[in-house]
Image: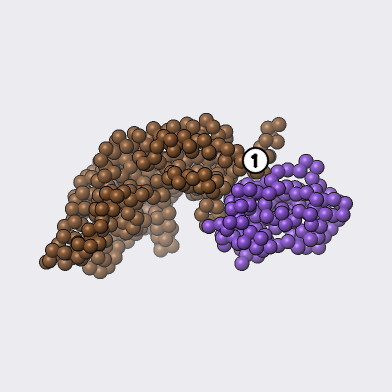
């Protein structure tokens, strides 16, 4: 199987696994039990991990709060800020991850008002739209750093400055960005940022929320004093160690790896667009994650494409409704203005530094005939051809 | 997620194509919902479906149900074909995931739509001819297990 679905999740590296293992065995102690070495070592490992993450993100270790996932970090940031602020308006974008959108929808049911900023055809939020949407009652702006489907990278610093000018908190879901592109919270000036380890070769089930010093949000879990009393529950020491090791490894030679992945991706994109007629690249041409390519193929539906590609040995993903349990195609593809039938025929390829040029060549050899085969059995294609003659 | 039977019909769909001189053509579903099925039939003077072809825009289950439905209908009389339910298609495929059952409903409706077209052309009428209103929601939820 050739793995081209790195935006979904990534493989844990042996080095990350090895960094985790001691916390299941010799350092199994509770990190709150610091008066004997078993617990003290667990605490030490956890605090070292926190310091590593903080250093990479450009903040203080006291500003890093470990969570069980990126989704948890998103939920916490938005609900926590909304509850604490006493204000009743939230601004986000139409293309956020469901962890953000569904949290906002939940708050709407509880009486909050939410503005979902539109995006342009490339998936970019307009700073002017954000400025116009902010009012005295705005508690929080939450705009994702990079989109999980189409890879578009937002002008986070610019958007954040607009929010700050009006005294509004800014959160960014950086789950797709951290570990892939350089992310520094001080440079971005954001108040909160979510990340998730399994997107950068760390384990699943561990993430973090950066909360800038002085930013007040409601605690997530009531209980003990863990995570400075903000998220109670005995810390997941092994996974925290894994997150830090993975982030540290991902940051090493990041520019080099990123350049390598970008070149592979560009080759794949050019190859697909040259070989498949009636195909388009979704997302911004340059302002996008280095490993992300997202295509729409007219006249076909994405799930059939995924199945054929899986049978040919490729793991990829789609924004098609049929690939999920819902009836609607991806909200992201609809938000960038694609009609339903074109949004149904989408394909996301997400590469990592583990992928090779040979794999891209192999993909370029199998994809065009699969698309053609599905088109040959599509009544939409038949209609299109008849219209042409 | 799919049975071997479904995967077989998805990978090697039977009766794909068009029939130039079809005397019954039915299209159901719409692109907005992500499923369109078009069925062509050649019905002879004894009202036997002597040939059938399909074209489908849709997921793996939609392609497999189209393929299986055409297999079940081929060689049957119009009246027999109208007795074939979506459940029969699902059973022949050895099951479908619950969220894909609507594809089988669409297949049943595509057969009915083609036969309705045949009725229009010939002035004949048959018992139990159902219509698809082309609405996304309508196929979902009814006649599902």
Query: Which chain appears brown?
Result: A
Q: Position of residue B67 (x, y in %)?
A: 67, 52
Q: Chain of mark 1?
A: A
Residue at 77% x, 58% y is B81
- Residue A104: name its quadrant: bottom left
Q: Is residue B118 visible?
A: no
Residue at 85% x, 50% y is B44
Residue at 45% x, 36% y is A360
Depth order, front residue of A31/B118: A31
- Rendered position, B107 above or below A181: below
- Residue A124: name its quadrant: top left
Which residue sits furthest bottom? A223
Q: Is residue A205 visible?
A: yes
Q: Position of residue A284 (x, y in %)?
A: 43, 36
Colour basis: by chain
Depth order, front residue of B108/A112: B108
Q: Position of residue B7 (x, y in %)?
A: 59, 53
Which residue does the numbered mark 1 point to in the structure image?
A376
Residue at 31% x, 44% y is A179
Depth order, front residue of A142/A342: A342
Query: Which chain appears purple?
Result: B
Depth order, front residue of A361/A67: A361
């Amino acid at each position: 199987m050739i793995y081209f679905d790195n935006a979904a999740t990534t493989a844990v590296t042996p080095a990350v696994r090895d960094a985790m293992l001691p916390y299941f065995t010799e350092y199994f102690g509770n990190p709150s039990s610091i008066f004997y070495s078993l617990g003290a070592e667990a605490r030490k490992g956890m605090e070292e991990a926190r310091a590593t993450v903080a250093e990479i993100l450009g903040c203080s270790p006291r500003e890093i709060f470990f969570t069980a996932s990126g989704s948890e970090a998103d939920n916490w940031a938005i609900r926590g800020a909304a509850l604490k602020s006493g204000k009743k308006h939230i601004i986000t974008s139409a293309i956020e991850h469901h962890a953000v959108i569904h949290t906002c929808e939940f708050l709407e049911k509880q009486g909050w008002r939410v503005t979902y900023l539109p995006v342009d055809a490339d998936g970019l939020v307009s700073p002017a739209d954000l400025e116009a949407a902010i009012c005295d009652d705005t508690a929080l702006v939450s705009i994702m750093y990079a989109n999980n489907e189409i890879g578009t990278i937002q002008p986070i610093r610019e958007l954040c400055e607009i929010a700050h000018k009006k005294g509004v908190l800014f959160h960014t879901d950086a789950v797709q960005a951290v570990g892939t592109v350089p992310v520094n919270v001080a440079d971005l000036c954001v108040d909160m940022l979510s990340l998730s380890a399994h997107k950068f070769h760390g384990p699943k089930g561990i993430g973090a929320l950066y909360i800038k010093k002085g930013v007040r949000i409601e605690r997530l879990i009531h209980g003990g004093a863990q995570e400075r009393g903000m998220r109670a529950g005995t810390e997941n020491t092994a996974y925290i160690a894994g997150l830090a090791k993975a982030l540290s490894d991902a940051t090493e030679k990041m520019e080099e790896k990123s350049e390598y992945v970008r070149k592979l991706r560009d080759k794949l994109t050019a190859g697909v667009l040259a070989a498949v007629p009636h195909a388009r690249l979704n997302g911004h041409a340059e302002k996008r994650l280095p490993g992300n390519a997202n295509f729409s193929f007219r006249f076909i539906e994405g799930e059939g494409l995924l199945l054929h590609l899986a049978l040919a040995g490729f793991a990829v993903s789609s924004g098609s409704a049929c690939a999920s349990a819902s009836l609607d195609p991806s909200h992201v593809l609809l938000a960038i203005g694609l009609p339903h039938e074109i949004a149904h025929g989408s394909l996301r390829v997400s590469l990592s530094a583990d992928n090779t040029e040979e794999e891209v060549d192999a993909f370029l050899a199998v994809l065009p005939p699969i698309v053609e085969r599905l088109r040959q059995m599509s009544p939409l294609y038949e209609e299109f051809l008849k219209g042409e003659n | 997620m799919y049975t071997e039977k479904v995967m077989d019909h998805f990978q090697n769909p039977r009766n794909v194509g068009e029939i130039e001189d079809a005397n019954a053509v039915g299209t159901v579903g719409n692109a907005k919902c992500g499923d369109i099925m078009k069925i062509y039939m050649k019905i002879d003077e004894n009202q036997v479906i002597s040939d059938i072809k399909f074209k489908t825009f849709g997921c793996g289950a939609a392609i497999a149900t189209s393929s299986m439905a055409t297999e079940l209908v081929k060689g049957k009389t119009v009246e027999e074909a109208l007795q074939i339910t979506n459940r029969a298609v699902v059973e022949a495929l050895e099951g479908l995931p619950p969220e894909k059952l609507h594809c089988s409903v669409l297949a049943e409706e595509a057969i009915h739509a083609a036969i309705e077209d045949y009725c229009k052309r010939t002035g004949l009428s048959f018992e139990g001819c159902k219509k698809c209103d082309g609405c996304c929601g309508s196929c979902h939820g009814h006649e599902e297990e």
